[in-house]
Amino acid sequence: MTDPVAELHPEEMRPPRRWRVDTSPLRTSRNFRLLWSSGLVTYLGSITTYVALPFQIKELTGSLTLAGLLSAAELVPLIVFGLYGGALADAVDRRRMVVGCELAMLLLAGVLSVNALLPEPHVWPLFVIAGLFATADALQRPSLDAMMAKVVRHDQMAAASALASIRYEFGAILGPALAGLLLTVGDTWMAYGFDVVTYVGSLLILVRVSHVSVPAEGDVASLRGITEGLRYAWGRKDLLGTYAVDVLAMVFGMTTAIFPFVATTLDAPWAVGLLFAAPSVGSLLVSATSGWTAHVHRHGLAIGIAAASFGAAMVGVGVAPNIWVALVALSVAGGADMVSAIFRSTVWNQTIPDELRGRLAGVELLSYSTGPVLGNARAGLIAAGTSVRFAIISGGLLCLVATATATACMRQFRTYDDRRNPHAVEQRRARGAAAPS
């Protein structure tokens, strides 16, 4: 019986090749190696600042409300500048855009370090810098994502996505532990200072990336250009499905904001850090065994199944009788989310024309950044009105039902096959098999 998601060739059935991570993008593309290495270094430092900011607010004010408002300071810049950053990515040199934003973030981390070294550090710069960090990230990310198709072969997109995920999950697991060590042994300035050092290292790598040109498109860095990108996304129902399913999964299934309360509910207040790390462990395991993803062609169906599985796993978290069952369920949820992320990224990279790639990367940034924020708000409000378990269980069930229903209703998304999809076929012909560098 044929696998409804993947069709395998006999020579691809060997277990080592099928299950081990495919490192071919690292071997065949110098620019990908440089971008991957730069991202690994800078993300590790960024995580330490991500942990240090709310920690310093707690130390200075003792206010949980102010610590929670950091997300609000970051959300508006992400929404506003994500779309504009996408338009810029289609109008300017993407490499220069990435390097310029990296330099800006280095300076911002330096300001945080200086503020932390003051005899009486100020609170207001923390909110301003958090907003500016979100602005720089929103401007940089579309250019960075848009460069992928220019440096990786079309048939290596799934492997490149998995490798990028390994980089992020490595940082998500090691970064908080390192931040905790720096904050415990030293002070907040050490965490910020470490971030400064990683930005310097990242810049030294980024300046070695070859020039990545974009076609001349006139004044696309404008409202007209942004509207054109949004119109293209709306017209591609297969592409629209990747955004919709991800947003639904995050809005209903995301619950990280109440993890400290989950630990208390399960009589394990010592396990808060483990709860935050567990999804990344599952994601890392999927990424490290992601060779099989290259043999999957029904990407839309795979995304839908993974998103529904994420919801089911979150139900498992809600009904868990103890912390260990909850950690296992969270690891499964993280793995399911990573499967969805790999195939979403593959669809985006394999089908979007280069002249629109930046603007569509801006749309992607909105889809995967606003969902978690709204999901955490939902979880907190539901938990406050009912209970922690009800908030998680109801969210998981809604995630499962909503993503399964959306997948069933969106035919072009559900039946997407990269071997026959006209957009994928067109881009495969346009790019050829060889990577530019």
Image (tube, helix red, strand yellow):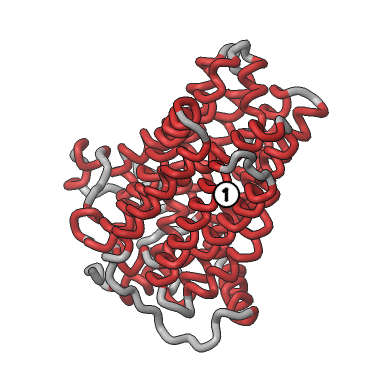
Q: Nearer the viewer, residue 137 or 284?
A: 137
Left or right: 378 as drawn, with respect to 45: right
Position in image of residue 277 (x %, y %): 48, 29
Callout 1: few (<14), some (14-19), or many (20+) C-alpha neighbours within 10 Å?
Answer: many
Above or below, comparing residue 415 to residue 54 in the picture: below
Q: Residue furthest front?
A: 119
Which residue corresponds to mark 1?
Answer: 246
Residue 262 position within the rendered picture, expressed as x and y whole percent measured from the top left = 64, 22
Res 153 seen here: no
Please indicate whether residue 269 sits to the left or right of residue 284 in the image. right
- Asked which quadrant contains residue 51, the reply is top right
**180 to the left or right of 120:** left
Query: Going 46% across and 70% down the picture, which residue do you hit?
Result: 357
Task: Give the residue drawn at x 32%, y 42%.
Answer: 290
Total labels: the figure holds: 1
Please identify the quadrant where the N terminus is shown. Answer: top left
Q: Nearer the viewer, residue 147 or 338?
A: 147
